[in-house]
């Protein structure tokens, strides 16, 4: 079967790398030949990080390339679309360019809230149901969590499946606790410049914790300073991220409680657990499913809880080890390419058949 994979980004884009690109070899083994066409390539993404925007001419060229690919869609048995093919354009235009070939939509974020919760009333009116219309016409919607899946069902999607965002066990290996310099444990957070705001919201809790117990906060992929907290900022690269996490002792994922955050897939928690780290997370969205409170980590619903749970873990190496081991076991059973790839291949093969599929 021939698939045209319309990704949002190239390999530098985490969502594209994790939701589709890391599965390509497994899909090939299952008889699926994938052609990849990113909307925004790595060069454009780097430009956005550096200049805070893609640039109008680059965007126009990217959309023209995407439209050209869609005009050649009939060469393929199935379109596998990350999020949407042509963001911010009317759904009818996009559906017109998708006609005649079944398509699968894949979501790891609540991007429909870019439209239905937009501050502009005109955007909400014209595009607020844009994603819902695409979902309703899709052969299959693959969602990273139940929140996203429910939106697809409510939109009238005929076939919805939940597949978590996962890691590749071949890249991740649990390591012994390092406890940093002079036996000082490390708390780690991994993300991007756009998501470091969630970590910044913990400043008071982490400063309070630092007054009680020594630790270093490792920030991977973002930059920030916290008064009273020993912070080390480490650049993110695909090659170094696993080692940078594995050198730490506790992984954290704070979130605010809003519709957008309820659509997140908790990937950083899975990364920490894959490295054998216990985790502490806000009980928002899928976090409350990934973290089995008291088994592989803790859920922290208040500033005081963040302090007490982290203090408990930092002060007890045996507890860190047992929780880290439980987390690693869960990743091996549920949250890895080795478990999810066969199911993804089966879904895509079924979606690409002539007969319409449904739950």
Image: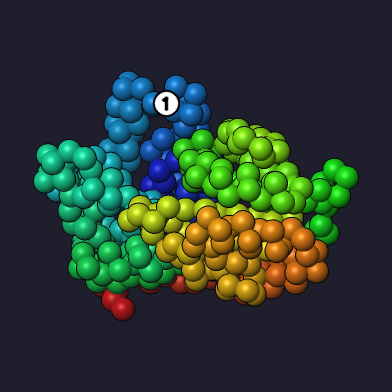
Disc 1 element:
loop
Left or right position of 98 against 290: left
Colouring style: rainbow
Left or right position of 136 against 229: left
Q: Quadrant of the C terminus?
A: bottom left
Q: Residue at x 74, y 47 (%)?
A: 215
Viewer-proximal residue among 300 and 37 = 300
Left or right position of 180 against 97: right
- Asked if one can make out residue 292 in the rendered structure from this viewpoint, the answer is yes
Viewer-proximal residue among 315 and 172 = 315
Q: Is residue 288 above or below residue 120?
A: below
The residue at the far bottom in this view is 359
Viewer-proximal residue among 326 and 65 = 326
Q: Residue at x 81, y 48 (%)?
A: 184
Viewer-proximal residue among 127 and 8 = 127
Q: Quadrant of residue 290?
A: bottom right
- Asked if one can make out residue 140 in the rendered structure from this viewpoint, the answer is no
Q: Residue at x 49, y 68 (%)?
A: 288
Q: Residue at x 69, y 46 (%)?
A: 210
Estimate how packed mark 1 is, as few (under 14), some (14 to 19) or many (20 or more) residues with alpha carbons within 10 Å: few
Q: Quadrant of residue 293?
A: bottom right
| Percent coordinates x, y for residue 51 in the rendering | 44, 22
| Percent coordinates x, y for residue 234 in the rendering | 67, 36
What residue is disc 1 on?
Answer: 52
| Percent coordinates x, y for residue 122 in the rendering | 12, 39
| Percent coordinates x, y for residue 107 in the rendering | 38, 56
The residue at the far right in this view is 182
């Amino acid at each position: 079967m021939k698939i045209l994979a319309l990704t949002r980004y190239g390999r530098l884009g985490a969502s594209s790398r994790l939701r589709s690109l890391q599965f390509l070899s497994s899909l090939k083994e299952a008889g699926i030949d994938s052609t990849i066409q990113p909307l925004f390539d790595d060069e454009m993404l780097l430009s956005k990080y550096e200049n805070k925007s893609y640039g109008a001419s680059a965007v126009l060229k990217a959309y023209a390339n995407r439209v050209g690919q869609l005009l050649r869609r009939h060469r393929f048995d199935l379109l596998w679309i990350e999020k949407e093919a042509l963001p911010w354009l009317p759904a009818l235009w996009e559906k017109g360019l998708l006609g005649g070939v079944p398509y699968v939509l894949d979501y790891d974020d609540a991007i429909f809230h870019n439209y239905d919760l937009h501050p502009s009333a005109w955007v909400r009116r014209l595009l607020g149901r844009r994603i819902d219309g695409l979902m309703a016409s899709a052969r299959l919607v693959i969602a990273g969590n139940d929140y996203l899946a429910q939106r697809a069902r409510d939109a009238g999607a005929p076939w919805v499946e939940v597949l978590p965002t996962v890691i590749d066990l071949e890249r991740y290996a649990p390591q012994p606790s390092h406890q940093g310099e002079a036996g000082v444990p490390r708390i780690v957070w991994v993300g991007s410049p756009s998501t470091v705001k969630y970590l910044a919201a913990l400043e008071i809790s982490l400063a309070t914790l630092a007054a009680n117990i020594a630790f270093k906060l490792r920030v991977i992929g973002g930059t920030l300073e916290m008064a009273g907290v020993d912070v080390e900022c480490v650049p993110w690269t695909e090659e170094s991220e696993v080692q940078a996490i594995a050198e730490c002792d506790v992984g954290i994922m704070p979130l605010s409680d809003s519709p957008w955050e309820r659509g997140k897939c908790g990937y950083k928690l899975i990364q920490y657990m894959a490295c054998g780290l216990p985790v502490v997370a806000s009980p928002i969205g899928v976090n409350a499913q990934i973290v089995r409170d008291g088994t592989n980590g803790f859920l922290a619903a208040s500033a005081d809880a963040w302090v007490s749970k982290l203090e408990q873990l930092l002060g007890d190496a045996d507890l860190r080890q047992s929780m880290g081991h439980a987390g690693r076991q869960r990743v091996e059973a549920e949250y890895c390419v080795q478990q999810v790839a066969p199911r993804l291949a089966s879904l895509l093969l079924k979606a690409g058949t002539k007969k319409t599929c449904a739950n």
